[in-house]
Amino acid sequence: MHEMGTVLTIVDTVEDLCRQYRVPALGYVKVEVGELSSVLSKYLLLLWPQGTKGTVCEGVPLQLEQKEGIAQCRGCGKQYRVTDHLEEGYPVCPFCDSKNYSIVQGADIFVTELGIPDS
C-alpha cells in the first residue's frame, strides 16, 4: 500500500514548512489529491493517525481536496476531463477524437494549506 509512503512524504513536507516558517502548532493540514495520482483518499485518511505519530502532525486533522484530471488535446488544443472520456482505458478527445494529449491537471499531490491555530 503506497498510501503510507505518501502520508510520510506529506508529514516530511509539513515538518519542513513548519521549521522554515517557525510554525509552533497546526490546526489542520490540507492536501490536494489529483484523481489521476493513483492515491486513494480513503487510505490517506485511514493511515494518517498512524503515519503522524511523534510528529508535528500528530492529532492534526487531514483535509483532502480532490482535483479533477484534465487533459489538453494536442490535436485541437481543447481541454477535457480525462475520466469522462476514456476509451479502452485511454483518454480520447471528445471534440476531435484524438488520442494525443497532455495531462495538465490532477496527476499530483500537493500540500496546499496549513491551518495555524489562534494563540
Image (cartoon, grey):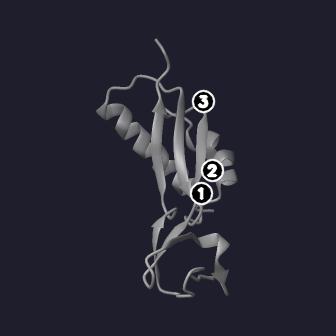
Q: Residue at x 41, y 37 (%)?
A: 15
Neighbor class of circle 2 (other Cα within 10 Å; few <14, some 14-19, many 20+) is many
Q: Secondary structure at mark 2?
A: helix
Instruction: Choose the circle earlier in sequence order: 2 or 3.
Output: 2
Q: Residue at x 65, y 58 (%)?
A: 40
- Residue nearest the viewer, comparing 100 with 94: 94
Task: State the mark number for residue 59.
Answer: 3
- Residue nearest the viewer, comparing 13 with 71: 71
Q: CA distance from mark 3 to mark 1?
A: 18 Å
As shown in the figure, which amino acid type bears the numbered disc 1? Glu
Q: Residue at x 60, y 40 (%)?
A: 63
The residue carrying mark 1 is 3
Q: Residue furthest left?
A: 20
The residue carrying mark 2 is 44
The quarter of the rendered structure image containing the N terminus is bottom right
Neighbor class of circle 3 (other Cα within 10 Å; few <14, some 14-19, many 20+) is some
Task: State the mark number for residue 12.
Answer: none
Q: Residue at x 46, y 43 (%)?
A: 112
Instruction: Choose the circle earlier in sequence order: 2 or 1.
Output: 1
